[in-house]
Amino acid sequence: KENIKFKYGHITFFDFDTGRSNNHSVEHVNIQGNLVYSLTNQTEVKVVHTGNWTGFYGTAEGTAADNPTDPMQLTKLQKDRAVSVFFRNKSHFDFEIGASAGATGRDFLFELRPTLYCPGRTQVD
């Protein structure tokens, strides 16, 4: 088995939101390493840097009804709840995905391509 190093890699995580009252079932993804990522200018995603990890957290209540069904046909709200992460010269990356305690189930959606296109900058929508 041989690891293959990709010159460029991308992953987009979608639908960062919360359960009731914006403080239950808060969705998050923590990614290790020095990151280049894109959010919209009106993002609802909170970014937290802790040591060598970058965390992305939902801040607003959402339901299954507002989940994206086509990653290339996102509504403004769906874009505002997404983050695209860009990698260079990597054979792997470490991430943790989860949600805080709460009474509602959560969906975790991601795709291995950039949906928000401007590496390292926010973008106007």
Image (spheres, helix red, strand yellow):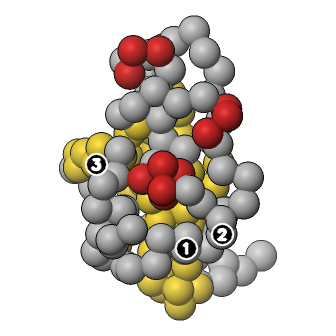
Q: Residue at x 66, y 83 (%)?
A: 4
Pointer 1: residues within 10 angstroms few (<14), some, or many (20+)?
many
Q: Is residue 88 left or right of residue 74?
A: left
Residue 64, image quadrant? top right
What residue type is disc 2 on? Met
Dot 2 lies on which element?
loop
Pointers 2 and 1 in contact (CB under 8 A)? no
Residue placed furthest toward the right:
1
Label placed on residue 114: 1
Rendering coords of residue 98 (x, y %):
53, 33
How far apart in space, not on screen, are marks 2 and 3 (Cα)?
23 Å
Name the residue at 55% across, 73% down: 114
What's the residue at 61%, 39% (across, down)?
66
The location of residue 52, given as percent across then percent down, is 27, 55
Q: Position of residue 82 (x, y in %)?
A: 48, 54
* Disc 2 target residue: 72
Is residue 105 found left or right of 93 in the rendered image?
A: right
The quarter of the picture where residue 112 lies is: bottom right
Q: Earlier in the sequence, mark 1 or mark 3?
A: 3
Q: Which residue is mark 3?
A: 47
**In the displayed structure, would residue 106 be above or below residue 31?**
above
Name the spot of residue 48 as percent of width and height, x first.
25, 45
Give how far apart the Cα atoms at labels 1 and 3 are. Answer: 18 Å
Tell whether 20 sits left or right of 110: left
| Type of amino acid under label 3 | Val
CA neighbours of label 2 inside 10 A, class few (<14), some (14 to 19), many (20+): few
Q: What's the residue at 35%, 62% (across, down)? A: 40
Instruction: Please tell me in which quadrant of the rendered image residue 58 appears.
Output: top left
Q: Check disc 1 and give the amino acid type.
A: Pro
